[in-house]
Amino acid sequence: MKKLLVTGSSGLIGSEVCLYFANQGWAIHGIDNNQRAIFFGSQGDTRSQQKRLETQIKGFVHHEIDVRDRPGILDLIDSLRPDAIVHTAAQPSHDLAATIPFDDFDINAVGTLNLLEATRQFAPKAPFVHMSTNKVYGDVPNEIPMTELKTRWDYADPAYKHGIPESCRIDQSKHSLFGASKVAADIMVQEYGRYFGLKTCCLRGGCLTGPNHAGVELHGFLSYLVKCNLEGRTYKVFGYKGKQVRDNIHSYDVARFIEEFLAAPRSCEVYNLGGGQENTCSILEAFDIVASLTNKKMVYEYIEKNREGDHICYYSDLRKIKKHYPNWSITKPLESIFSEIVAAWSNKFTLNQK
């Protein structure tokens, strides 16, 4: 039986990958130390996801290891010798990074290096999939001429009608410290492919989302927005008139792509992995969609200051990823994503009231 090692296994993407590949017959090992609860408090706690994996996956093995623990990571991969590695563990908030710069860099950059070197030494044939981020592009996408529409911004330059391609530059821009630490990891993953010949890819995610996301204000756009709506909590909109646009991809479709890559791995590749233009929405549009599902008006406060390095409009150009892996496509449309998140939060609130 093939062995899959997933870091950040209790998070949104990590847990989805664990469950997906368990159903494909893989033996699943997960690394997670619930650091999200330290970052975001009890609202970010992921222990329930860990318990779900232990309950639903036969033989699931949880490893309580911090990716910063170099000897621990080396020893684990030496003993396990996994057939593939999916690295989703991260400090995920570009706002929080500014207050914890050492933790942010050590987790995102150094933690990734620890895993790569352990892979090179003990599992060099194992494909290595790294969950990067569109924040590696910094605010370069904001340099593209924009058109302001009634409820959103969009690219005025027809060269970007398909979205942001992988050829977009990643330097000479403002990233946030989070974006900078993820750039360091992204480049190192590429280099271990290019220099050492490992089968590596960086997935530069758009808005990764789904019903299992423990969304909080500093991370988890759609999940947190839906939660605020259902609770009647005030949602804070930071700048750009609430017309900033994101492309949204369900965690299931992320796992499906990883399956395609592991079946035919390539070396030192980068892919923009998001929902594409069809799965875009602005914050204002998201308010309307969730209100139509819950029959509750969105309560929000507008703050005339955008987040540092934030994108005005971002959606992924999926042409490269589809060219390399033509069997992969988006299966979860935006409406389905919203419906699943609303149902998940509604169910949690109902259970908490019992």
Image: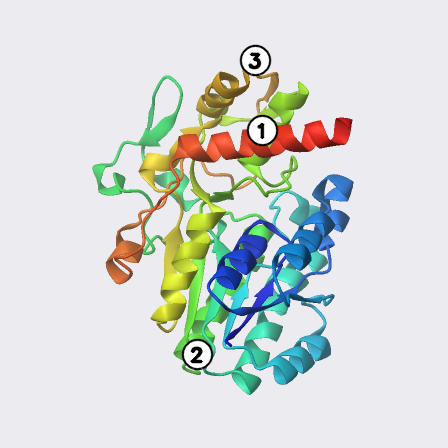
| Residue 63 coordinates in the image, percent (x, y) | 70, 68
Q: Left or right: where does residue 40 sit relative to residue 150?
A: right
**Residue type indicated by callout 3:** Lys
| Callout 3 crowding tier (Cα within 10 Å): few <14, some 14–19, many ≥20 | some
Q: CA distance from mark 2 to mark 1?
A: 39 Å
Query: Which residue occupies the foreground of this view, 353 or 220?
Result: 353
The residue pinned by badge 1 equals 225
| Residue 86 coordinates in the image, percent (x, y) | 52, 65
Which secondary structure, mark 2?
loop
Please say which color scheme the image uses. Answer: rainbow
Residue 81 quadrant: bottom right
Establish if 269 lies above or below 51: below
| Callout 1 crowding tier (Cα within 10 Å): few <14, some 14–19, many ≥20 | many
Q: Left or right: where does residue 140 sit relative to residue 354?
A: left
**Residue type indicated by callout 1:** Leu
Looking at the image, which residue is at 51% across and 77% down?
1
| Callout 2 crowding tier (Cα within 10 Å): few <14, some 14–19, many ≥20 | many
Label located before the other in sequence (2 or 1): 2
**Residue type indicated by callout 2:** Leu
Residue 198's tag is 2
Label located before the other in sequence (2 or 3): 2
Looking at the image, which residue is at 70% across and 43% down?
44
Residue 297's tag is 3
Looking at the image, which residue is at 55% across and 29% down?
342
| Residue 32 coordinates in the image, percent (x, y) | 68, 61
